[in-house]
Image (cartoon, coloured by chain):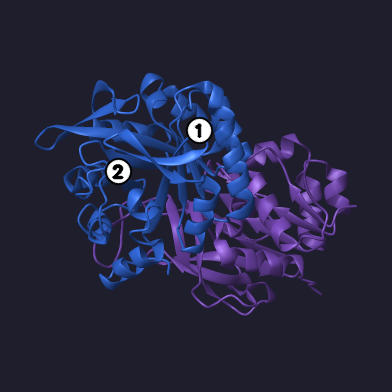
Amino acid sequence: MVDIAIVDYGMGNLRSVYQAVRKVAPAASVQVTDDASVIAAAGRVVFPGQGAMPDCMRELDGRGLRQVVLDAARNKPFLGICIGLQMLFEHSAEGDIPGLGVLQGEVVRFAHELKDAQDNKLKVPHMGWNGVHHAAHPLWAGIAQDARFYYVHSYYVQPRDKDIVQGTSDYPQPFVCAVSRGNLFAVQFHPEKSAAAGLKLLENFVNWNPV
Amino acid sequence: MLAKRIIPCMDVTAGRVVKGVSFVELRDAGDPVEIARRYDEQGADELTFLDITASSDDRSIIFHIIEKVAEQVFIPLTVGGGVREVQDVRNLLNAGADKVSINTSAVVNPQLVADAAGRYGSQCIVVAIDAKQVAPGKWEVFTHGGRKATGLDAVEWAKKMQTLGAGEILLTSMDQDGQKKGFDLALTRAVTDALEIPVIASGGVGNLQHLADGVTKGGADAVLAASIFHFGEYTVQQAKQYMAQQGIEVRL
């Protein structure tokens, strides 16, 4: 049995996630895996994702991992990252497809022709370091209010239940970048690429014991 | 709000970081892994490695370097140079790159950009454009390290790359590169105004005001520089503080 399973469904660069988790949990056994039995037996699960959501959903199902991810999201410390956050919701505008439906709400695209308050054009994808206004949650322990995390995405989540929101960023309007429910926490940014703040969040996750 | 990024760039050949002037006259700047670690400590927002090795024999060196850096540095890493097929993208991502930069091969085979973005996502595909002014307000794309004219208009080419799935454009002015006189701001502005995806300005930074100008006058989303950081003239942190004083949003 591994302590931390990183779900591999063939999308994106999982090596970064692996390296960062190893860095904050040097004593833990960490495995990047597409084996449902390994994920089912793992103590905690990291669910990353990169690329387009339709491809991610197709690859997840193609590897027969939907059920084990659903179970993990409901039963053990679970961290969704980027598309791994978006896939938890009911529906995405990217490809107009259903998600896993663990959380209620939609995934929508940033508007075209976005402008900031000084009328400068804002690019999409939203790429780079943005400040996070966070709520009180054990995963934010030791992380300064408005600390910057690294993002790269064109879509963001709109949860129906506002009580699950654990963080927002501005582009230029506030958008939800972190949610939690029970044993589950998920973020839009890439903690594995967010230097000290990101490593701290991952460290908090590997030490997190949700009730 | 989103910060403007400062990206130190390392040209790597034979396992060393080097820096040239207008793409020639190489000067040794040190060990890439050590330099990467130093820039990370200084608060660099990303790191870019360009493998300028001509011979494919030495190709494995860059993989080893990226692996070593990725173990120690937890910010985005972009790697370019010699990317010819989708498998090259895969190999660099496997080694620990977060983004792969495609330059000459995008011109030779534009479908490569579409295929790579389709397979691995636009977020990891950077198209690098080396451009040279050919008339007032007109720039031409050059390939093969700036040696070969293509007849392509830089602004139109950038738009085409965006359409094919590039997630970002790394725009280098060949006229300014290594001259330390600042970015080609008109080129930067022309490309960034034409695109919806982020643009990294590159080529010509000699002081901190040049970096600030790239953002405020050129409209760049990120600024890339090499020699001002390699040879200890400025730290990344100094650059960020300077930009912050001018009201530019940066990650301090």
Q: Chain of mark 2?
A: B
Identify the residue at horizontal 58%, vertical 38% (top origin): B93
- Element assignment for label 1: loop
Task: Give the Cα separation between the discs numbered 2 and 1.
Answer: 36 Å
Quarter-wise, where is residue A209 in the image? Answer: bottom right
Quarter-wise, where is residue B208 in the image? Answer: bottom left
Q: Nearer the viewer, mark 2 or mark 1?
A: 1
| 10 Å crowding of disc 2: few (<14), some (14-19), many (20+) | many
Q: Amino acid at mark 2?
A: Leu
Q: Amino acid at mark 1?
A: Ala
Left or right, residue B50 beside residue B242: right
Q: Which of marks 1 and 2 precedes in the sequence? A: 1
Circle on res. A146: none
Q: Which residue is mark 1?
A: B14
Q: Which chain is blue?
A: B
The answer to whether tags 2 and 1 share a subunit is: yes
- Total marks in image: 2
Nearest the eye: A60 or B232: B232
Nearest the eye: B114 or B50: B50
Residue A141, horizontal then vertical, whole percent: 65, 77
- Element assignment for label 2: loop
Q: Colour of chain A?
A: purple
| 10 Å crowding of disc 1: few (<14), some (14-19), many (20+) | some
Q: Which residue is mark 2?
A: B195
